[in-house]
Every structure is written in C-alpha cells, then in structure tokens.
Image (cartoon, grey):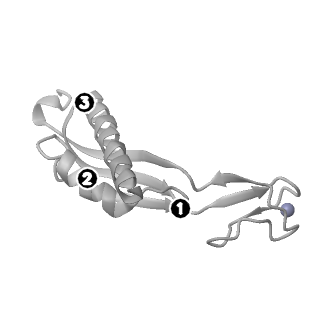
Amino acid sequence: MLALEAAMHERAVTESLLEIALRHARQAGANRITDLYLVIGQLSSIIDESVQFYWDIIAENSPAAGAKLHFRRIPVEIECLQCQNRFTPNDTDFSCPVCSSAKIKVIAGDEFFLEAIDVELTRANLPHR
Ligand SMILES: [Zn+2]
C-alpha cells in the first residue's frame, strides 16, 4: 500500500513537472523540449527511476516527448539548534556530532524542483533579421 502511495505521488509530481516545462517552453516560443534539469535533495522521497518511468508515459504526444531528464542530487545539510554546528549526517544518525544534540534543522536536502530546460525553437519563432 505504501509503495502505491509513493508511486501515485511521483505520478502527480511528474505531471506538474511537464506542466511547468511546457509553460516555460511556450513563453520562450519553443515548440520542443529536449532536456529537463531536475534537482532532488537526498532526503526527498522522489526516486529518479519512477519519475523517468512516468515521464515516458505522461510526456508522450506532448512537445516534451522524448526529452532527456537530468537529475542532480543535493546532499543533506543539517544545522544543530544547540550549538549552530552545520554537518552532513550519516544515513540514520541526525544528531549533532559536536554536542550530540538531537535538536536539528534541515537546511538542504529535501528539495525537488525543475532547475532548467533546453528547448528547440522553430524557424518561424526565430527573430527576424
Ligand atoms: Zn550541536
């Protein structure tokens, strides 16, 4: 059941990804999207393969069909609220290595967003000389 929820979540995420990419492409006067650059924090539950899987289905028959997805992983960064030490945690241990406080704040690593896209402009949309 959990797996299905995660999968449905990723499908929704991928759908909004396509929406955003198409909107930007339209604004740029592009008729085809060739590449998408995604940023995923290591704490994010988003799985590259799932996004790619849904992408192939969702983007089909759209101007982004066949576009390549590039994933950039951002490492987790934690700040200790006790001593303000900043550190990258182990897989399971999120307590501060300096003062061993468990009062921490996630600074980076839980993000997921579309950083950039590459598009192809049609001849008709190129500026006239
Ligand atoms: Zn600390």
Q: Earlier in the sequence, mark 2 or mark 3?
A: 3
Q: Report how far apart the C-alphas of labels 1 and 2 lie in the structure.
A: 20 Å
Q: Which residue is disc 1 drawn over? A: 42
The spot of residue 77 in percent (x, y) is: 66, 59
Q: Amino acid at mark 1?
A: Gln
Q: Amino acid at mark 3?
A: Arg
Q: Which residue is disc 3 drawn over? A: 26
The spot of residue 57 in percent (x, y) is: 18, 50
Q: From the viewer's perspective, tell me whether residue 8 is left or right of residue 127.
A: right
Please give the name of the residue rendered at 22% of the width and 30% of the height, measured from the top-left corner. Answer: 29
> What number is the disc on residue 59?
none
Q: Depth check: 127 or 74 in front? A: 74
Please give the name of the residue rendered at 34% of the width and 42% of the height, measured from the top-left corner. Answer: 12
Q: Nearer the viewer, mark 1 or mark 3?
A: 1
Contact check, label 1 and label 3, Cβ < 8 Å: no
The spot of residue 119 in percent (x, y) is: 24, 43
Q: Amino acid at mark 2?
A: Tyr
Q: Secondary structure at mark 3?
A: helix
**Looking at the rendering, in which quadrant would you find the C terminus?**
top left
Q: How many marks?
A: 3
Residue 101 versus residue 97 in the image, above or below: above
Q: Which residue is disc 2 drawn over? A: 54
Please give the name of the residue rendered at 32% of the width and 46% of the height, measured from the top-left corner. Answer: 14
